[in-house]
Image (cartoon, coloured by chain):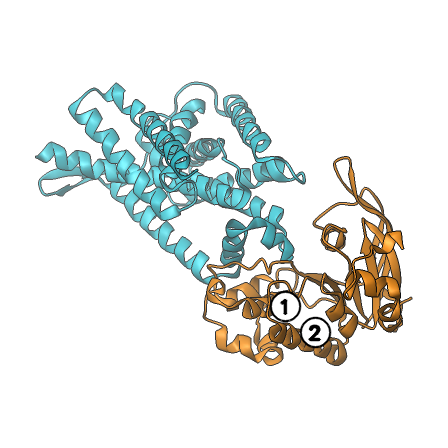
Chain colours: A orange, B cyan
C-alpha cells in the first residue's frame, strides 16, 4: 500500500486493456501515493508501457478504472523529442496544460539544460536527450511523473546521474514517481516499493527490499532465468 | 515581349492566390494528416460573404475581413466535424471533407442561389515596363507576402506556432508531451479556413462567383500543395507561382480552355514522380 501522505495520487483498479482480441493488461490494480516513488518492472511485452500510456490517457481501457488526484506527465520510452526544435522549444511545448511556460525553473533544477537551450534536440547525446525529456515532462508541473524506461540505451554513468535527478525531484519537491523499467536492479535500488508485471498481470508487489530478497525475483530479474508466473 | 511580361506578372499574382489555398491544405495536413478537399469551399464561402457584405453597404476592407473571419469559423466547424471524434482514420476524414464540400454547395445554393454573382475588387490599373496590370493583382501579391511573413513570425516565435510544429513533426510524441493534438488540429482547420478565405476574397473578384467555383480552386490549391509534399508552406508558395505562370502562358499562347488542364497535369506528374521515387527507395 502507498505510504505517501494524503492517499494515493494514482489508483488503478482492475484495469483491462486490449489490442483487438489480444488482452494486454488483465485486471491490473496498482496505487501510487502522494510523494511516493514506485517501480514497475517486468520483461519485454509484459504490458508496462501499455499501462503507462493508459494512465496518461493515450490508450483507452476496455474495463476498470484509473483515478488520478492531480496531473500526470510522461517521460516516454525512446525520449520522443522533436529533433528539429531547440531544447528550449522542446521544454516549452511540454507546458501545454499549464499557464507558466517559462522554463527558467527547469534550468535551476537541471542546469545542464541551460547550457544546451539553443541546441537542436536531435544533435544531443542520449543522456542529454533523456534529460530534456524529463524537463519537458516537468514543465507540465505534474503531481505524478511517469517515467518509461529511463535507462534504455544509455551508459551506466548517465543512468546513475539521471536516477539521482529523479531521487532529488522526489525528495525535494515531493513529486510522486512511477518508474517503469526493464532494468530491475536500477528500479529496485531507487524506488522503495515495486510492482512486477508479467504477461499483463501483476505477479508480485511489495517493498523493494523484500522483493530483492525473493528467490523468484532474483532468478527472473537479477541474474536468473525463471519466470515469476511459473514459480 | 509585352504579352510575355503581362502573362508572367498575372501568373505570379494568380499563383500567389493558389499558394494561400495550398498553405491551408499544408497546415491542415501537417497537423492532422487529413487532405482537406473542402479547402476550396472556404474560399467560395468567403467570396459569397464579401458579395453580401458589399451589397449590404459595408466598405471594402471591412467586408473582406468579415469574409475571412467567416471562412475561418467555417473551417473551425469543419475541423470539429472531421476530427472531433477520437481516432477518425485519415482516409475516412478525407472522404468526410468531400462530403462537407457538397454540404457547403447546398448551403451556398440555398442562401445565394445557383446563378453567377460578381463583386468588385480593387479597381484601376498601373503600368510596369509598358504593360498594364490591375491593382488587384498587385494586392494579391502584397497580401500573400504579408501573410507568409506573419506565418513565419507565428511559427518562429509564438507558443502556438511551436506547438503546431511539434504536432506536425511527430503527433504521437506531441500526445505523449501532453498536447491535445485534436484541439491543435481543429485550430489548424480554422487557420486553413482563414487562408482559404483570404484566397477567395482576392481571387474571386477576378472571376464570376458560383457555388461550384471551389472545384477549380481546390484542384489548383492541391496541385500547388503537393509541390512540397503537403508538408512545406514555402514550397507550396513556389508551386502556386509556377502553376499560376504555366496557366497564364498556356492561356496566352494556346487556348484558354487548356489552362484548366495544367493543374491536373501537374498533380498527375508529381504523383507519378513520387511513386517512382518511392519504388526506387524500396
- Give percent across and percent down for residue B203: 34, 35
Residue A77 visible in the displayed image = yes
Question: Secondary structure beneath disc 2?
Answer: helix
Judging depth in this view, the residue of A24 and A105 nearest the camera is A24
Q: On the image, which quarter does residue A113 sit in? A: bottom right
Instruction: Point out the image quarter for the C terminus of chain A.
Output: bottom right
Ranked by sequence position, the earlier of labels 2 and 1 is: 1
Badge 1 marks a residue whose secondary structure is helix
Name the residue rendered at 59%, 70% in the picture.
A155
Task: Chain letter for mark 1, please.
Answer: A
Q: Nearer the viewer, residue A63 or A97?
A: A63
Residue underneath mark 1? A134
Residue B252's spot in the image, x, y percent? 18, 26
- Where residue B162 sits in the image (x, y, percent)? 50, 58
User: Residue A144: which disc?
Assistant: none
Whether residue A9 is visible here, answered yes or no, is no
Q: Return the chain for callout 2.
A: A
Circle 1 crowding by C-alpha within 10 Å: few under 14, some 14–19, many from 20: many
Q: Quadrant of residue B198?
A: top left
In this rendering, is residue A152 above or below B229?
A: below
Q: How many marks?
A: 2
Q: Is residue B88 left or right of residue A44?
A: left
In the drawing, what numbered circle is on residue A166? 2
Residue at x 45% of width, y 63% of height: B157
Instruction: Work out whether residue A185 or residue B52 is closer to the camera in this orientation and state it.
Output: A185
Q: Where A26 sits versus A156, above or below?
A: above
Amino acid at each position: 500500500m502507498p505510504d505517501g501522505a494524503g492517499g494515493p495520487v494514482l489508483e488503478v483498479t482492475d484495469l483491462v486493456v486490449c489490442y483487438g482480441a489480444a488482452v494486454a493488461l488483465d485486471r491490473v490494480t496498482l496505487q501510487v501515493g502522494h510523494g511516493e516513488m514506485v517501480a514497475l518492472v517486468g520483461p519485454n511485452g509484459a504490458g508496462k508501457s501499455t499501462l503507462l500510456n493508459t494512465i496518461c490517457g493515450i490508450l483507452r481501457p476496455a474495463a476498470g478504472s484509473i483515478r488520478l488526484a492531480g496531473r500526470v506527465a510522461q517521460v516516454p520510452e525512446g525520449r520522443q523529442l522533436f529533433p528539429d526544435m531547440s531544447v528550449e522549444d522542446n521544454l516549452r511545448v511540454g507546458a501545454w496544460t499549464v499557464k507558466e511556460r517559462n522554463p527558467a525553473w527547469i534550468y535551476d533544477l537541471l542546469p545542464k539544460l541551460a547550457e544546451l537551450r539553443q541546441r537542436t534536440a536531435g544533435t544531443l547525446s542520449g543522456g542529454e536527450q533523456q534529460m530534456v525529456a524529463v524537463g519537458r515532462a516537468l514543465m507540465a508541473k505534474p503531481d505524478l511523473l511517469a517515467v518509461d524506461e529511463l535507462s534504455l540505451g544509455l551508459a551506466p554513468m548517465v543512468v546513475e546521474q539521471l536516477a539521482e535527478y529523479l531521487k532529488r525531484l522526489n525528495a525535494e519537491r515531493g513529486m510522486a514517481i512511477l518508474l517503469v523499467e526493464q532494468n530491475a536492479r536500477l528500479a529496485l535500488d531507487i524506488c522503495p516499493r515495486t510492482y512486477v508485471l508479467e504477461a499483463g498481470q501483476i505477479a508480485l508487489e511489495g517493498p523493494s527490499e523484500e522483493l530483492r530478497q525473493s528467490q523468484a525475483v532474483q532468478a527472473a530479474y537479477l541474474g536468473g532465468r525463471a519466470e515469476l508466473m511459473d514459480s | 515581349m509585352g504579352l510575355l511580361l503581362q502573362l508572367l506578372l498575372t501568373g505570379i499574382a494568380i499563383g500567389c492566390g493558389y499558394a494561400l489555398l495550398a498553405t491551408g491544405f499544408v497546415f491542415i495536413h501537417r497537423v492532422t494528416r487529413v487532405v482537406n478537399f473542402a479547402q476550396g469551399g472556404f474560399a467560395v464561402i468567403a467570396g459569397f460573404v464579401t458579395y453580401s457584405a458589399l451589397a449590404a453597404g459595408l466598405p471594402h476592407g471591412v467586408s473582406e475581413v468579415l469574409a475571412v473571419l467567416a471562412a475561418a469559423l467555417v473551417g473551425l466547424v469543419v475541423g470539429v466535424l472531421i476530427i472531433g471524434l477520437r481516432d477518425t482514420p485519415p482516409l475516412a476524414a478525407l472522404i468526410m471533407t468531400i462530403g462537407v464540400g457538397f454540404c457547403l454547395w447546398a448551403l451556398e445554393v440555398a442562401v445565394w442561389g445557383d446563378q453567377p454573382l460578381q463583386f468588385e475588387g480593387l479597381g484601376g490599373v498601373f503600368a510596369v515596363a509598358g504593360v498594364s496590370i490591375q491593382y488587384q493583382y498587385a494586392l494579391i501579391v502584397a497580401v500573400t507576402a504579408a501573410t507568409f511573413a506573419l506565418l513565419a513570425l507565428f511559427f518562429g516565435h509564438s507558443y502556438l506556432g511551436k506547438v503546431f510544429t511539434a504536432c506536425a513533426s511527430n503527433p504521437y510524441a506531441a500526445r505523449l508531451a501532453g498536447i491535445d493534438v485534436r484541439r491543435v488540429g481543429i485550430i489548424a482547420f480554422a487557420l486553413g479556413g482563414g487562408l482559404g478565405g483570404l484566397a477567395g476574397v482576392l481571387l474571386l473578384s477576378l472571376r464570376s462567383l458560383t457555388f461550384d467555383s471551389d472545384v477549380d480552386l481546390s484542384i489548383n490549391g492541391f496541385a500547388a500543395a503537393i509541390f512540397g509534399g503537403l508538408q512545406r508552406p514555402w514550397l507550396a508558395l513556389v508551386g502556386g507561382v509556377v502553376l499560376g505562370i504555366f496557366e497564364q502562358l498556356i492561356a496566352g499562347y494556346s487556348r484558354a480552355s487548356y489552362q484548366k488542364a495544367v493543374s491536373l497535369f501537374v498533380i498527375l506528374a508529381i504523383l507519378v514522380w513520387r511513386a517512382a521515387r518511392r519504388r526506387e527507395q524500396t
